[in-house]
Image (cartoon, grey):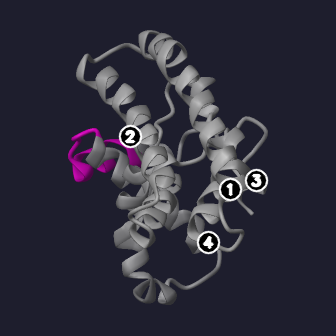
Amino acid sequence: MYDQIGGPKLVHAGCWSHSERYFSEAVQLSPQDPTATAIVARIDELFAIDAEARSQRLSLEARDALRQQQSRPLLDEIRKEIEAARSAAPPGGALAKACNYTLTLWQKLTRFLEYPELELSNNLAENSMRPVAIGRRNWIHIGSPQAGPKIAAILSIVESCRRSKLPVREYLAAVLPGLADRPI
C-alpha cells in the first residue's frame, strides 16, 4: 500500500520495533518457547548497536561503519533464526505470523544498512503523529479534500520545529511573510 507513496527518490524502510512487537507477542503467548525469546534478544542487540552509536555521538559515516561491522553479521544470524523458526512453527501461530511479517519486509527492514541516516524504528514519527490520530474526529470539519495535505504540511513544520527545539510561532513569523514571493 505505501509503496506507491512518494516519488522515485523516496526510500521505503521498515520498522524493527514493529517486527520485535510481533515476536514479543509470540513470547507472551508461549513464554516457554525459547525460539521467539532468542529472536527478541537478537533484535535487542541490533537496537543496542544503534544506541551505542548515539551515545558516542558518531557521525553518519562512523555510524555506517559500525553498522556494517556489527549489524550486518547480526542480521544474517537473525534471518537464519527466523527462517528456522518459521519452518518449525505451526502455520497459524503467533511465531509464524512474526516470522512471515519480518521476512516479507526484510528488504525494507535492512535498508538502514544502505542509508545510515535511517533509524531502526519509526516510533518517533508515529508518536509525533499520535495527537493528530487521536483528534481525527475534530479534523473532519476542515472544509475540503485539498485541506488535508496542507494541514499535513503545517503539522510537519510544527513537529520539525518541536524536534529542533525552535519556537514555532517565531519560526512561522519569520518564514511565512516572504513565502508568497518565492517561486515553487
Residue 119 position (above or below residue 26): above
Residue occupying image coordinates x 45% and y 38%: 42
> What is the distance, in whole Å, between disc 1 and disc 2 at their CAs?
23 Å
Look at discs 3 and 2 and give the one toward the viewer: 2
**Where does residue 82 sit, x and y in percent of width and height?**
62, 46
Work out how far the residue at label 3 is from the one at label 2, CA to CA, in angstroms. Answer: 27 Å
Q: CA distance from mark 2 to mark 4?
A: 22 Å
What residue is shown with label 3?
3
Three-letter code, disc 2: Asp
Give the Cα distance between marks 1 and 3: 31 Å
- Check disc 3 and report its element: helix, strand or loop: helix
The quadrant holding residue 27 is: bottom left
Label 2, on which residue? Answer: 44
The magenta span reads 164-177
Q: Are marks 1 and 3 in contact (CB under 8 Å)?
A: no
Residue that carries the numbered disc 1 in the rendered image: 88
Q: Which mark is residue 93?
A: 4
Instruction: Judge whether residue 168 is colored magenta.
Output: yes
In the rendered structure, does residue 82 fall within the stretch colored magenta? no
The amino acid type found where label 4 is placed reads Gly
Query: Mark 3 or 2 closer to N-term?
Result: 3
Query: Mark 2 falls on what kind of element?
Result: helix
* Percent of width and height locating residue 97: 64, 65
C-alpha separation, residue under disc 3 versus residue under disc 4: 27 Å
> Image check: 81 left or right of 128?
right
Pick the residue in front: 184 or 78.
78
